[in-house]
Amino acid sequence: MASIILSAAGSAVVGGAAANPFLAFLGSQVGSQIGGKVDDFVFGPLTISSQKGGRLQDLSVQTSTYGRSIPVAYGNARIAGNILWSRPIKEVVTTSTSSAGGGKGGGGKISSTQTSYAYYATLAIAICEGEVDEVLRVWADAGVVDVANSSVTYRVYKGDDLQLPDPLIESFEGVGKVPAYRGIAYIMVEDFPLEAYGNRIPNFTFEIKKKALLPDSSGNILENMIESMVLIPGSGEYVYDTQIEYKISGEVVGANFIQNGKKERINQHNREDKANVLLALDQLEQTCPNVEWISLVVTWFGDDLNARNCTIKPGVEYKVGATTDPDIWGVGGFTRSTARQITIDVNGSPVYGGTPDDDSVLRLLTELRARGYKILFYPMFFMDVANKPWRGRVTGSVTEVSNFFTKTNGYNAFITHYANLVLGKVDGFVIGSELIGLTKVKNGSNQFPAVDKLVTLAATVKGILGSGVKVTYAADWSEYHHTDGGWYNLDPLWASPNIDVIGIDAYFPLTDETQTEYDLEKVIHGWTSGEGYDFYYTDDARTTKASLGAAYAWKNIAWWWSHSHVNPDSTTSAWVPESKKIWFTEYGFPSVDGATNQPNVFYDPNSSESYFPRFSKGRIDFRAQRLGLLATEKQWKDSAMIERKFIWTWDARPFPYWPDLTRVWADGPLWKTGHWVQGKLGLSTLGAIVADLCRRVGLGDMDFDTSRLLDLVEGFIITNRTSARKVIEDLQKAYFFDAVESDGIIKFTGRSGTVVKEISQDEIISSDKSGSTELVAIVRKQELELPSRVEINYFNRLADYQVGTQRSERQVSSSKDSVEINLPLVMPDQEAKTVADISLFNAWQERTGYRFDLPYRYALLEPTDVIRIIVNSAEHTLRITDTHYGKPGIVRISGVAEDAAVYDFYTAPAAVSPQIQAVTGSGLTHIAFLDLPAFPSDGEAEAKLRFAAGGEEMNWSGAVIYRSDDAGGSYAHIAGIEHEAVVGNAIDVLAGGTTTTFDKANTVTIVLKSGELSGANELGVLNGANTAVLGEEVLQFQTATLIAPNKYVLSNLLRGRLGTEYTVSSHVAGERFVLLDASLAAMLMPTGLFGLSRLYKPVSIGMTLGQTDSTNFTYQGKALRPYAPVHLAAARDGSGNITITWIRRSRVGGEWRDAVDIALAEATEAYEVEILSGSTVVRTISSISSPLVTYSDSQQIADFGSVQSSVSVRIYQMSSAIGRGIAATATL
């Protein structure tokens, strides 16, 4: 009676909670179809947790609760933590003191003291039940924390059975007194700064991944069967680089490159602070742990489908306007200026990525070797012509085909470059791929010149690489066997002693029909049957079949491999049967329905080769792709003929950054239907999740069967204590499967609508003793009992796991009822919409119930079976919900109406803008050390070193400046910078000009690397606006005209400000420009540091001292340097004595005030005067205390031999701190 008890429980829990007839009905169906085991044993309380009342928001709130249920997660999920342990919040008090003055002039000492407070949290946060595969992202409140690129220490414990207690907790609580929290995934956070969160502990949430994979009947898991993988994309200038490379926009000025705007990370868009390819390889290792070989694709580009005109060259994404750092791109002797410019599309973007830089390729090969992989190097070329056709379309005449290989920028140069480049670094090398348009060209002697050229090329490559490296050619699946007329054209190549294995890009069609089910055995059988094996189509419409002999059956690989080959001229080819193993140099399937019908096609609206497989509806279908992969791996597992199978493909751009970052990578939208397997392999399977739930309540693997549950689950979360039945109900609401006791085990099976038996009216037994002729009792629910709308709430990964809602409505219905279903599942929008559609239409479909009796020969029918009955010439399709064995020889059947079309709903994915953002980290800080004249706001004795800083990259949030006074032994904090300075360079030369009025004649063009400029009116400029330093000159500008991004022309200038008029004619192109505004930081410098070299580090917020290079700078104290005197004059008396006069200026306080002389701004008034003979100083007059000095006639005679008619002088005002000021020079 287990089924009766379960049915009652299902109705009570689900129906009662929802108070809705539809959900009550669903609950009763779930319950009644599970029987055989005692209810409390199978579906009693669990020690796991699940959503209570379906409240999805429970997942986003952090707690610190004793006894809280530990969440269980499958797949990807975002979960709030529970604080396990914490220290009291730590307060750090920082006091800094700066001083100035007190130098040799005896000036008073000025000091400034600042005290700041910072708060930090140290805590351990439990995430979920372990063991998880990885923690992908961490949020603090709504912001993602850059865990890898942070000064905060994070330690992730994945929850395995061997993890040890955290050493920090032990240091406080005592060794042996701290649990290891085995079986719980948690994270330890040390000294997390709280300033950005209002000095409180933020709400931490975590994205985790925990795979749940179901073995097949032989115990095989696809991910574990895979041993060889192709790594693409092949194009992308630094897509394979293991070190982070930067693109720097700008232009060359003379010998200098002038940066325009921020640096851009070319090959790091993840949060792991590592190059993309490194994270992609980490993910490959986690997803497919048994991969042994990596096939690395590298591409050059062809420019014509006619072999006569086609050249093969490496390509670049741009020629000018930017450079790269730290490496400069180069491939095979080509530079950025000599390589092919990849075609630019209407949006201004290259249609392909550029050829990978040679040095970056070598670094990746080293990395692959270090990870223990063997490497097959796989050069190929893409066609950079209109509509991006396949390289197999390149063809030509016999002569043109021969020249294609040997001409300048021909094919051989491409291949031999890489053979020489990778010498000693690879285990295999592919000399060509899918050149079918060339290899089928035959001359009058029945020879194939392209094949002959490949034979020669194989010998060349073998000679370079040596006998230890396997050399092959990757033939198209339609090329390897024979060509037009039955010629075994590639056999001379296959027989060559320099070819070690037969390479086939094995995209053979395995099925040839509309996909209605996922039948693994049918796909496996497709390898040894069907088109290309038993028959071929004689017409383009593929309607007429003709039998195919084994000698020409191109899918009969075994016959081809094990037999000699006879050409149409009766000659036997050079191929020796079974002489070499076969490698599938590529095989794979698009992730669409019908994938196994035509594995070689792909969808790309920008390519002339864009197709969906035959009979495909173009629907995203990861299961169909997985089915093809599993069938292929199983078919050729342990084959004596097929030695290696390389899956196409894994991308060097890590998931989910690629494909989600469509603003970075234009091909991201192709992922969902393409051959890529990352993000598709490793997804949890529904069968594995249900199996795990069954095991948790004590069922053994022989007690249940979930092998028919093939759906892939992106994520599923259980957060509260519940029963297994309740958890399975949540899954049933989304994946539409049933459970039944059959043959002593619980079988879970998905609904497909496939009819297993048709029953005629004559076989139905009347059960009505009244003599009624009614054979079947049909009950139809009223519309008012049915929903008119169904809403599905779920978690959307692309929206950072926020709750999404999809709904389905009946437009015409008298029912006003609405059903809301909360699914603790992570799924894309279109999948949730499909669930809503199926739920609604299934409810209306199942409104019709049936009950009738059948003879005992139908006793094998069981719940979940779909049958069709014919009553009064009308067909009724129904799904059995219950079977009851009543009177002897009678089986009573109960069921509901079923329509396979209900489960065929599909919603195409809409274009979305994922919330995931490209990650660059805070990046390094560029800094300008400004030893400038005193600002009007500075004190007389204040010598300030000013800093202008900004981020090398976006997302810069400030920096802390440190100084070392012991040559780098230790560093002390000296200043902080919160605001980005406006910094750039001049790309032309500012000519000399007037310093007493606005210079309206000259302009200068500035390119900024950070910040922006704007104009000001004349009064604003006169009041100090738009002050900048260009080179050594301090100037102001009234007009800033933007002429290009980050490029301005400055005009209407005030020149030589703050006593820098002596620099106005000394400008050069490329010199530094800094806007002197409030973004600058400043510190008082003691005179004891004047003239001393010191090391400085501008440490970006979020980075460490160790991540920051030091800069050497010597401060000279220019703020204390007196200005040059002005208005120099001379008068001669009757004796020939010359009296020289001048007017002093003040560094500070020099405003013109009535009846008041300007401030002296020095401890004492003192000057020095030099008398010059040409450039030689012949006399220095010191100890001058007023702006006047007499150069006597006797001194003139002593210096020059006679009284002079004119003299050249340099006059300095003296500073007690630094000595001479700026010289005023004149001939008087």
Image (cartoon, rainbow, N blue to C red):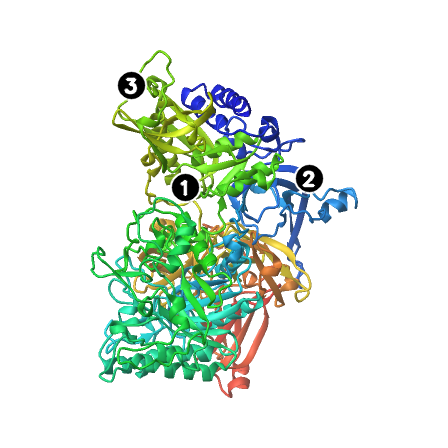
What residue is disc 2 on? 86
**Residue 388 percent across, percent down from the top left:** 28, 63
Is 1196 displayed left or right of 348 in the figure? right
Compute the Cα span from label 1 to label 2.
37 Å
Asked if the residue at tag 2 contacts the one at tag 1, i.e. Cβ–Cβ closer than 8 Å, the answer is: no
| Label 1: which secondary element | loop
Dot 3, how many residues are within 10 Å of its Cα: few (below 14), some (14-19), or many (20+)? some
Q: Which residue is mark 3?
A: 814
Amino acid at circle 1: Pro
Marks 3,2: beta carbons within 8 A:
no
Q: Are marks 3 and 1 in contact (CB under 8 Å)?
A: no
Question: Of label 3 and label 2, which has the lower sequence position?
Answer: 2
Q: Is residue 1127 visible?
A: no
- Residue 807 position, x and y percent, is 36, 31
Q: CA distance from mark 3 to mark 1?
A: 31 Å
494 or 1148, which is in the foreground? 494
Q: Is residue 960 above or below residue 832?
A: below
Q: Residue at x 36, y 73 (%)?
A: 314
**Does residue 920 appear anywhere in the picture?**
yes
Residue underneath mark 1 = 828
Q: Position of residue 185 (x, y in %)?
A: 62, 44
* Quadrant of image for the C terminus: bottom left
**In the rendered image, the vertical position of residue 1220 relative to residue 752, given as above or below:** below
| Mark pair 3, 2: CA separation | 58 Å
The amino acid beneath tag 2 is Ser
Element class at badge 2: strand
- Relative placement, left or right, of 1180 versus 487 is right
Q: Earlier along the polypeptide chain: callout 3 or callout 1?
A: 3
- Disc 3 secondary structure class: loop
